[in-house]
Image (spheres, rainbow, N blue to C red):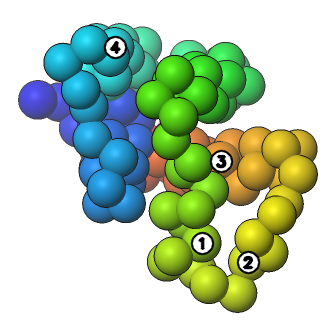
Amino acid sequence: MNRGVGTELHSILDWWGFRPTKSCQCKALQRYYNQKGPDWCQEHLDEIVDQILREAGKRKVNWWQGIQQIIPTLSRTLPECLQRIVLTRIVQVCINRARRF
């Protein structure tokens, strides 16, 4: 598979233990973000973050708890707006990584 924003994002989320299910659209979104490229993903950053949060909500996954296990110094009860800031930064890191390829 091409190394792109979707692959980078999948790699980070997989490392935290969030893996695609048979019923989710994660693999399709991974391919889509790879095809669209880093510039498109940068322009649609909020949309990507929204999609991740929607998917986590469908699965009743608290992605934030997964991050807190890795970075225990973070507050356990950050409001959604701060969660969005952190997740936006994660996607930005994926975009920057994809631009190197």
Circle 3: residue type: Leu
Q: Which marked residue is nearer to the observer: mark 3 or mark 4?
A: 4
* Three-letter code for the amino acid on which mark 1 is drawn: Gln
* Residue 48 visible (yes or no): no
Front residue (pair 48, 92): 48
Q: Amino acid at mark 4?
A: Gln
Q: Which residue is mark 4?
A: 25
- Residue drawn where x is 42% and y is 13% of the image: 36
Q: CA distance from mark 1 to mark 4?
A: 25 Å
Q: Nearer the viewer, mark 3 or mark 2?
A: 2
Name the residue beneath numbered marker 3.
87
Question: Which label sits on residue 74?
Answer: 2
Q: Quadrant of residue 41?
A: top right
Q: Nearer the viewer, residue 51 or 88?
A: 51
Q: Quote the CA–CA distance across marks 1 and 3.
A: 13 Å
How far across and down, in percent of the image, does residue 6 sit?
36, 31
Which quadrant is the N terminus positioned in? top left
**Residue under label 1:** 68
Using the rendered image of the protein, determine whether residue 64 is visible from the camera's viewpoint. Answer: yes
Task: Please tell me whether mark 1 sits on a helix, a strand or a loop.
Answer: helix
